[in-house]
Image (cartoon, coloured by chain):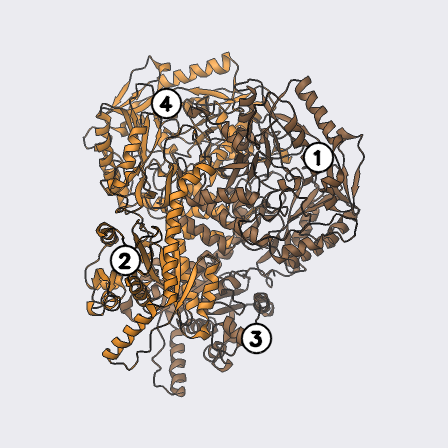
Chain colours: A orange, B brown
Amino acid sequence: MAYPGGLWTKLLALQVYGANTGVGKTVASTILLKHFMQKGIHKPQWKDNVDSEWRVNYIKPVSTGKLDDADERYVGKYARCRTSTLVQYDDPLSPHVAAVNAKRIVYNDVILSQLTRKLSEQPRSLAQNTWGVTLVETAGGVMSPGPSGTPQADIFRPLRLPVILVGDHRLGGIASTISAFESLTIRGYDVDAVIIFEANKNLGNFAYLEQQFARFEIKTFELPWIPDLENCTPEEEGKLMKAYYEGVSKDLKVGRIAQHLLSKRQGRVANIKTLADRTKKAIWHPFTQHQTSTEDVLVFDSAYKDFFQVKHTPATKGFGKSEVQTPILGPMFDGSASWWTQGLGHGNPMLSLNAAYAAGRYGHVMFAGATHKPALELAERLMKQLENPRMKKVFYTDDGSTAVEVGLKMALRAACKRYGWEGSTEPVGVIGLKGSYHGDTIGAMDASEPSVYNKNVDWYRGRGYWFDYPQVKLRKGTWIVEPPADMADQAKQEFENLNDVFNFKARGKASHYEEYITKTLDTLVKEQGRKFGALIMEPVILGAGGMIFVDPLFQQTLVKVIRNYDFGPTPKTADEHAWTGLPVVFDEVFTGLYRLGRASAASFLQIFPDISIHAKLLTGGILPLSATLASQSIFEAFLGDSKAEALLHGHSYTAHPIGCHVAITSLKMMRANSQKPHWKHYQDRWTPRNGDAQPIQVVERDERENSAATDPLAPPPVWSMWTKKTVDYLSHLPQVDHVVALGSVLAIALRDAEGSGYTSNAAAGLRDKLLATGNMGFGIHSRVLGNVIYLMAGINSRPATLEAVERALKKNL
Amino acid sequence: MAYPGGLWTKLLALQVYGANTGVGKTVASTILLKHFMQKGIHKPQWKDNVDSEWRVNYIKPVSTGKLDDADERYVGKYARCRTSTLVQYDDPLSPHVAAVNAKRIVYNDVILSQLTRKLSEQPRSLAQNTWGVTLVETAGGVMSPGPSGTPQADIFRPLRLPVILVGDHRLGGIASTISAFESLTIRGYDVDAVIIFEANKNLGNFAYLEQQFARFEIKTFELPWIPDLENCTPEEEGKLMKAYYEGVSKDLKVGRIAQHLLSKRQGRVANIKTLADRTKKAIWHPFTQHQTSTEDVLVFDSAYKDFFQVKHTPATKGFGKSEVQTPILGPMFDGSASWWTQGLGHGNPMLSLNAAYAAGRYGHVMFAGATHKPALELAERLMKQLENPRMKKVFYTDDGSTAVEVGLKMALRAACKRYGWEGSTEPVGVIGLKGSYHGDTIGAMDASEPSVYNKNVDWYRGRGYWFDYPQVKLRKGTWIVEPPADMADQAKQEFENLNDVFNFKARGKASHYEEYITKTLDTLVKEQGRKFGALIMEPVILGAGGMIFVDPLFQQTLVKVIRNYDFGPTPKTADEHAWTGLPVVFDEVFTGLYRLGRASAASFLQIFPDISIHAKLLTGGILPLSATLASQSIFEAFLGDSKAEALLHGHSYTAHPIGCHVAITSLKMMRANSQKPHWKHYQDRWTPRNGDAQPIQVVERDERENSAATDPLAPPPVWSMWTKKTVDYLSHLPQVDHVVALGSVLAIALRDAEGSGYTSNAAAGLRDKLLATGNMGFGIHSRVLGNVIYLMAGINSRPATLEAVERALKKNL
């Protein structure tokens, strides 16, 4: 499930991939292994001036064909090193066929676990001044399927062992070698060396490939091909081959290959070891007080699916074992979903390949007065998938903050135009919620109330009014809706199940909310004469504000009151979706696109905004792109005879094809994932069992794209990827103030005698403990917001992973 | 040089690629061609209910081996269609070896020209109710080199013909087929169908591949492999094969393949035809007045190197020929460098592959408290390559506008802290230049004077003072420096050569500028008591302001005066690079990174800023990423005991590994390109020939990364990628007010009786004419800024391309 990246202090482990079958992977492995079997042949460069001996190891993870003919035996015979085969099938066919024939499919996790154990054994058994070298030889070509059908390059990706690629020396071998290299590269492998056997010199494979790979700073080596064995008796063959291996393995060329592999490894380790210090020198980190920050700078070597590969530091404790024995890297569960962006898992080859496709087809093409397929089809798909009938136009920008700026420009302009406030020197503000956060550009900051984030930004001018609101909290097993200080006359409400909070019909008319909001508006607008141009808020959960779960009924009521409030004269229109009162802007950057379990978080409120803002998960978590969606009546506020009346906003990479194409791929994949059994499983676990509770309609979703998956205005099924049991348990702990869980989000607010908020350090201790937890084979990387620690799953995180994380959480709290 | 995308109204042209040699490309081609030779077999779906006949064509662009054995003959014999070979070598080896052996290397452009001509001939010769089908069969595998050594998939990329991929039916063929597909995908090809021959059913290749490709919505078809020909006489062989082709070509399966290919094509054409209208429905375009915009929405099908592939419209005139005969797509020179982002050419496979590598290795990893190799190494490389000794820290954001916001936050904070203006309710402004532009987020807008861009942004508050300045213009062959109205007492200066403008030593002390600036500052600061926190400007050329070429001596003087001016008490420091006066911010988003011919535009001014902002070309033109570089003394202004004092800014995708890794690749490639012969050639053309002029020091640049390429404070060589002759010529035309040329930029300011500026339409006519110019085989896509039309080359545009563009420009002016 989680595997340490394949890098040890005392072990040089490499994976041998072939450009095709029959290119000499086993021969190349034998030569190298035999070379290392020579006493004192190389000093391991990462330890100077030490007399050394090598322990040499060969692992064939999956072998097909009779054991007598197996590569393991062959390598053992000629190299005389330790050898092992992890999975063996008798049929000399592709493993995925042989496995079916043998009625024994060995799953990827089993192979990886065995391989990891095998690799880890070696450093543990090494005496002082001995070092290990292990070659892991794959079967067939780079993309040949393993027993489960997964291509090998994908199976072994979690270890990301450095690769020796054995090129194809035959006619056509240039093409297959380059393509094999590209398949490895797309999957984030580093090819440390290419080896190609001498064949017909006329083909020119070596000379050509050497030059090609030099462009990638990869060295290509040539080795003599095996002797002609035709018409040999087995005995003669054995003799010939023995002589061949004797000769070649001592060849200077082979020495150079070995030296090169050692020096690549040394370079990699040295780089990893200096990264943190060099970073401190060159990098100005976001959101970081560089003077007092005591956090280690974590070094991320790579990432795969739910896990980062992080260099062990004192903070991670290397999972509690000695540095020499354990891998240099360790897997860390990505508990912040990589700052809330991650959905489809890190290093997803489908996203990589699609990014490369768009880069190859377009690069970037400018978007003013122009169009391209990815931009248009993403706009069409977004509007459909979000199921908000108001949305008619999509405007692209680069990140959540710029998308918010565009949303603000749209809303303010529409309101100012309708109400005749254009050019007003008096500031026109927004209405929002306390603790809201909309991004770091100054315009986006101005839409939030003064806070620690913006108070030192010299151009920040909070422009608006921010409502206090009732919050949803799970406290000691009971879901409560806690009124704010402003509504002290209201009683705390209690709910047996979270879905009851969203059952607005059962909760009845929210007249107390209506009164409170209307009264406040009257004071602001009628008494103080203040002007407002937009309602902007994050639906359901305020993220950066501290994972605050706002009573959805309050948010719904706020929208309804604002839409009916008299801010000025409203023209009659036939457009049933025209905005009224103020344009309503939902910032779904954090809460949208399946983060909370639904395509749009607006559907939790059962109400539609006029402007909807999306980023983060839009690209499935690989690169920046954002979209601001608007209704027709918002769009029309910018129509006019002069260009100056248009929305004169645009970034150079607006609607960049790579982002748009990846986003289309991501939206498809996220939708498909949301309909898979693991989500059904998550949902079922949260379905209330008692007869009284509102039964949750798990609508049978249709695979066909063109059918609405759910009625967007129906009470949503409310569930979390985290177990109800754990969430309940946590809410009972004495040090926990309350817990919040919805969709992929779990947030735990800890009690802090010093007070809560961004500057609290209450949760930092737990964060540090989780980082160093390693009992289940991985640590947990998490982020805190003051006294709140939160964890986030990906769209396709598996229940078993999340349950392991829960166990660690319970243990460390 | 420029080729139309391979898509015609009456011709179905496809390219047949193989997963390897020996997989049956020619057999598959023969079957399909023979199938189409049957009368009335398919109606071309893009024309309903018409009795039709097919003209069937086979082209082998490059063939090796004796002509008697050539694929052309074979296909002709069995399919009985027209066949042709474009380039033939006798040696049965890889074309790149055969070409060397034959001492006859046929270059890619020759092959492409011949192929384009051959393909274009067919639609022209088709009678009514006849349609064409052409298969273009490649040699070897997807990445097999052509005669020049370029991989075939790269050679044929400009046409981007839809691909039939013939998979490998042998053991190991699953891997090679998938890898071949990935190589095509990285290059932006669409694979319309995969064909694989039946072989040993046990291998399971077809079943596996069918499933894999279905994930990409690609259909896989199986065909029966050829009869066993062992021990056949040539006569028997001929008979067997004839029977085989007769049978197979009439097989229902083949009918389905043909039908599928036709329907893919129909889908593509239909999509291209509806893209513009659907875009008008769904897309809110940047910088566009949707009510009055009369510009066609151009449909970009793809892009390659310097050229977009654009769907012909009435505006492009299809290069003046009938729709039926000419391709649906036409190449357009990317004259705006794709909104100033493009440098290394569109669809650059090196950038695609590197983007995919980082996506595969990391996806995205969050950056707070963390680091990764691409982010750190980009920071280190940027600081080195820009050669500004002040720069010590790099802060990442997503685009030029967000990078400017960060730069402003840095500068304002540093100044306010030093001068005790923190929390001042009085606005602290910036000092800038009139006509400047720093991006579209509201904070960035606030740093520019009121203009058409920001006047309707309701939260815009111009905060600062913007100097008027002398401008550099080429008018009637003479470079002049024209003083602004504010400096009416100054005489216009004239220079024989552009490099004389930059020879500050020869120009002497700029005391008139000093006086003017100091006097203005005295009025603002001493008399009016205004507060300023930064000097921000675009060095050398103000882009969006209308390609205004500011006198570099004025900009240098402004920095010097500001640095010496008394804005408040300045603490003593040992840091020789500490900022004084005001922090100086250079917005190099447009002018930096080789756009003007140098890594940093600051080097033209021979002075270093304290904060330097970079975006656009940073990623070589493929995806958004930006960096704000700062000096140590700026960084230190954010150190403190509390987190609130830190720079609390950060976007989710901050330092995203894909962007950083691509940027490293781009910086390396741009630097390498800047040292290639074509740049030397451009530079030489601008070297003054007369003895009096200051000789330009073309410093011999060193390939080694770690040597400073040039002395950054030496007078820079001043040159353009556009010819001096054309630039001179244009400046003499009566309708031209003046011309500006530097590095890759050429801007022509047209006289406009209605006045100049963003709202002028003077240049729109020329833009439209250039779009429809097609004499040299391509049109020119350009952008205008009011009365200014500009053209921009890429870093590796070739002289021949630019000279053709110049000819078109001269013809249409």
Q: For mark 3, name the chain.
A: B
Residue A71 or residue B152, whichever sits in front: A71
Query: Vertical placement of B277 versus B559: above or below?
Result: below
The residue that label 2 is drawn on is: A54
Marks 1/4 in contact by CB < 8 Å: the verdict is no
Q: Amino acid at mark 4?
A: Gly
Q: Amino acid at mark 1?
A: Phe
Q: Amino acid at mark 2?
A: Trp
The residue that label 4 is drawn on is: A757
Between the C-alphas of marks 1 and 4, the distance is: 49 Å
The residue that label 3 is drawn on is: B103
Name the secondary structure under disc 3: loop
Residue A360 or residue B786, whichever sits in front: A360
Marks 1/3 in contact by CB < 8 Å: the verdict is no
The residue that label 1 is drawn on is: B554
Q: For mark 2, name the chain.
A: A
- Residue depicted at x 62% and y 42%: B601
- Residue depicted at x 74% and y 33%: B510
Marks 1/2 in contact by CB < 8 Å: the verdict is no
Q: Position of residue A726 (x, y in %)?
A: 22, 32
Query: Vertical placement of B104 versus B676: above or below?
Result: below
Near mark 4 (Cα within 10 A), the count class, few <14, some 14-19 or many ≥20, is some
Is there any visible trace of residue B288 in the rendered image?
A: yes
Q: For mark 4, name the chain.
A: A
Displayed quadrant of residue B329: bottom right
Marks 2 and 4: same chain? yes
Between the C-alphas of marks 1 and 3, the distance is: 58 Å
